[in-house]
Amino acid sequence: MMLESYALSSIGSALKPLPADWPGGFWWHWLVFTIIAILFVLLMVLFFTYFERRAMGRLQARLGPNRCGPFGVIQPIMDAIKALTKEDIVPYNADKVVHWLAPAVAFVPVLLVFVVVPFSNGAMLADLNVGILFVVAISSLSALGIVMAGWGSNNKYSLISAMRAVAAVVSYEIPVVLSIASVVLLAGSMSLNDIVLAQNIPFILMQPLAFLIFFIGASAEINRSPFDLLEADSEIVAGFHTEYSGMKFALFYLVEYAEALLLSVLITTLFLSGWRGPLLPPWLWFLIKVVAVFFVLVWVRTTLPRARIDQLMALAWKFLFPLSVINLVITAIEVLAWPGGVPWPMLFVNIGIMAVLIVSWSRLFKFGWGRVKVEA
Amino acid sequence: MALQISFWILAVVAVVAALAVVFLRNVFRAAFALIMSFLAIAGLYITLSADFLAVVQILVYVGAISILIILAVMLTRELHQGNPSNNLELPALIVVLLFLAAGVWIVLATNWKVSAVPPVAPTTSALAQALFGGGGFLLAVEISVVLLLAAVIGAIVLVREK
């Protein structure tokens, strides 16, 4: 009953889609939504840096930044000013051009992806027919920026970090794309707006396994803790941004949080029915869901210990990859069995399948796997 | 008009980047010039209203193949000097000139036809129908899949620990 009433109320509050050239004319549309996308990314990144530090403080039973302004809200702006006024140091033996270009190459793709994100019904810069494929393709370009940084710094720790980043991105791309594919199968479209429109029941219920795989895989791809072993202080100095300072370092920091924002936005759009919801305006629902997903990211970061590089690879290839293939096959069978749309009671079957698969598959792993014994 | 301008920008970028791949001595920078060329070609696909192909070009060539090339470059020693010189320069020049002549002759001698049919608007479903639908190229797709699988298994066998 509850699910039906949710579906009805969300249809009731679904607005008529904005026309493709709102507010009047191609160039106005382009200008308005470019400004919206850039402002959205920059303001949300400022908010996220503050929010993460405060939430981490609370979760670790301490205060977090609370000195600048009321509750410390000016802290991110102060941090930005500090980064801007610092000296920019380039190593003597660095590949100067590559070192200089790397932060920009890492940042541009992340910003580009927000072109296809719907903030409300049809409110996006371009409703691409290949939307989610565009997201996957463009966001994989960020790894190039990391490789350039690792190489251009002429520092062995940076290079090791870049190699790890590439290994993580290449391995985790596969389960992530397969879990996206099962969502696309269910929605019947690759346009992000159509995927939101198809979610009378949020896909987190219809595709719980795909949600978990996407969440883990995408966190690993953007190097969030517990998979931040390529830039964590205790691992290899500071990873690929060891040799960066001042504004260029700030740009890498920006990329990190913009990617976390991207992950939150994608989970909201693909699994939490995007801008849809009762009573409140669509853009507000969108923001609430994005912040909620980001809070879960912070929560995971403060809770779980860091993975090792071999555990990172094993998790991708031995756990997430087979489960995502099985999930894709099951989803394909469901879609073939009900061509008019999978009925909502199937969500109980899917949740059951997820529980059985995860429990049975995790029996193949045990604590301390992959530990290397050194003979004395 | 806008289409023409974007075509020329993309074409010039693609050709200049391709020349840079050949003439740069630093192999790492050459790899990035190659990526630039791939991106410009993806842009050309968009001007030809082949959006799916453009995105797949970025996904496969820029996202995957170039990463593999860069990994291979990182495992190379002394790449600042470029290739060590040998006495294959003359044969290489002759082969390349012959190849260039053949290519130019083929391009000039072909009677290029312009189709009067307007391009298919959402190419994704049309492509899916052509590849997996009835009377499509399903057999060819399956053969290429088996080929790739064989390559993957071969690679695993080659690097397996004894």
Image: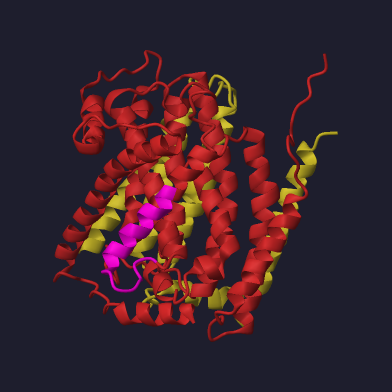
Chain colours: A red, B yellow
Name the foreground residue: B4 vs A315: A315
Residue A102: percent from the left, percent from the top? 37, 33
Residue drawn at x 71%, y 60% as measured from the top left: A357
Residue A69: percent from the left, percent from the top? 18, 34
Name the foreground residue: A361 vs B20: A361
Q: Is residue A287 above or below residue A152?
A: below
In the displayed structure, does residue A38 sit left or right of residue A275?
Answer: left
Q: In which quadrant is the C terminus of chain A drawn? A: top right
Q: Is residue B42 above or below residue B98?
A: below
Query: Which segment did they paint magenta?
Result: A274-295
One can see residue A191 in this view: yes
Name the foreground residue: B65 vs A152: A152
Can residue A277 be found in the magenta stretch? yes
Name the foreground residue: A298 vs B116: A298
Can residue A293 be found in the magenta stretch? yes
One can see residue A138 in this view: no
Q: Is residue A373 above or below residue B116?
A: above
Residue B24: percent from the left, percent from the top? 42, 29
